[in-house]
Amino acid sequence: MSELPKLLNSPFAIQIGETSLLVKRAGIFDLAELQDYIDSQSASPLARDERILPHAIYLCAKKVYPDISEEYINDLLPATFVMGNPKIATDLLVKLGFILPPKPQKETLGTEAKQ
């Protein structure tokens, strides 16, 4: 029997509209692949950011659903999903493990008050 530690990246559900999709957290290779994808986009920063979310979800969903496609993810994400809540992209990228959660506002307020 192998002495390797057991991996604990268990699938969890994210809600996209009325669809619940199982995903696993991003690993270092997923982060590198997303960075390559970002670098390949020659669009404006705003349009590029809108393209990142479906690709990030795809990278994490294909660990659970090997046959999933980026087109499927794109069809799940209506434009109104992001337009209705602009913060949702950041929230999902944090949940998927691609970016760190923002620091709480209390720390910055406390530092400014001391100066």
Image (spheres, rainbow, N blue to C red):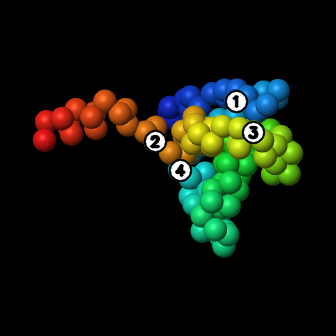
Q: Position of residue 61 (x, y in %)?
A: 73, 40
Amino acid type indicated by mark 4: Ile
Instruction: Check contact, mark 3 vs mark 1: CB within 8 A.
Output: no
| Residue beneath the point at 59% across and 39% down | 87
Mark positioned earlier in the residue sequence (2 or 1): 1
Q: Quadrant of the N terminus?
A: top right
Which of the two labelled residues, at mark 3 and mark 1, occupies the earlier sequence position? 1
For the residue marked with disc 2, what is the amino acid? Leu
User: Where residue 48 sits: x, y (%)?
Assistant: 65, 61
Residue occupied by mark 3: 81
> Would you name the residue on which mark 1 appears?
14
Q: Which residue is mark 4?
A: 28
Would you say 25 lies left or right of 108 here?
right
Between the C-alphas of marks 4 and 1, the distance is: 20 Å
Measure the C-alpha gap from mark 4 to mark 2. Answer: 14 Å
Q: CA distance from mark 4 to mark 3?
A: 27 Å
Choose mark 3 or mark 2, whichever is in front: 3
Q: Secondary structure at mark 1?
A: strand
Tell me the residue that label 2 is attached to. Answer: 100
- Location of residue 8 in the rendering, given as x and y in whole percent from the top left corner: 56, 28
Q: Nearer the viewer, mark 4 or mark 2?
A: 2
